[in-house]
Amino acid sequence: MRYFEVAPAKASWRWSGQYKAEHRWSLPGVDCPRCGPWAGMSAYPSVSLVGEVARMLEQARPTTTLEEYGRLAASVAPLLTASQPLTPGCSFGPLVGTAQGEFGPVTAWPSWELILREDALVALREAGAHDVLAVPVELRAQETLPTLYLVETRPLGQVHRGSTRTTGGPCGECGHPGEFEVAQDWALNQAALPSADVFRVEGTAVTVVSERFVAAVSRLGGSDVEYREVPSTPFRNLSM
């Protein structure tokens, strides 16, 4: 299986669709005495919160103490699977907001969110990509919008260590994974390749899709996205 990094197109765009939205719920970021305030970008739109758990997150401050974060995270953890790790700032539920314009089959702006038109999701299902988990968005618009879905991108892939340069180790207090720089032509860790058609690369905001994904959605015409093939072999040198 070949894999491709998804990014917004650099050339002029064909489609005018754009949106401004946030997930319905999110954990707060943390203010670590060692690292300072920080929050990750993980999002699990398939996770719906109700009752007391939803209320606690709705009332939480944007940034909180490690103790309070731990309490809130513990209330959400039973709703998640092993492939949905929790980090400060983690979001849940559908995207809620506003939209305008016409949307192509695939939208990747901002780059860490992957929006599919309904016909693109149908094409993926017909191609056998049944593992793609897509949740309907809740976007208001003056004009009629097609049915749109946000793809849940779980952190299943890893950058090969030959493609990174570590600039800071993990924090033993808050769990921050540490800082690292990624090579421009980075590679996936072949020993940890998932079988998923869509996934996020652990520790980054990069979305990766399979060749089956690219082939299926490309049959619907052009989208304002670019696909760069990502190798799964280590590099000898780091080329920044």
Image (tube, helix red, strand yellow):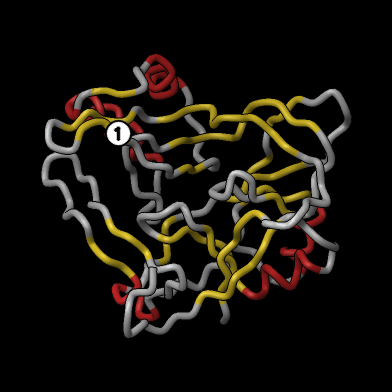
Location of the C terminus (image quadrant): bottom left
Residue that lies at the very extreme toward the right in this rendered image: 144
Residue 91 screen position, x and y as percent? 45, 36
Rate crowding at label 1 as few (under 14), some (14 to 19) or many (20 or more) other CA atoms within 10 Å.
some
Three-letter residue code for mark 1: Ala
Location of the N terminus (image quadrant): bottom right
Total label count? 1
Camera-side residue of 172 and 231: 231
Q: Residue at x 25, y 29 (%)?
A: 69
Q: Is residue 118 visible?
A: no
Residue that lies at the very extreme toward the top in this rendered image: 59
| Residue 217: quarter of image | bottom right
On the image, numbered disc 1 is attached to which residue? 73
Answer above or below: position of 51 versus 222: above
Q: Residue at x 66, y 26 (%)?
A: 97
| Residue 105: quarter of image | bottom right
In the image, taking residue 13 as reference, residue 180 lies left or right, namely left
| Residue 23: quarter of image | top right
In the image, taking residue 229 as reference, residue 115 lies left or right, namely right
Residue 129 screen position, x and y as percent? 66, 67
Camera-side residue of 236 and 156: 236
Q: Residue at x 36, y 82 (%)?
A: 235
Q: Residue at x 40, y 45 (%)?
A: 80
Residue 224 screen position, x and y as percent? 74, 55
Q: Secondary structure at mark 1?
A: helix
In the image, taking residue 148 as reference, residue 109 lies left or right, namely left
Residue 29 screen position, x and y as percent? 32, 30
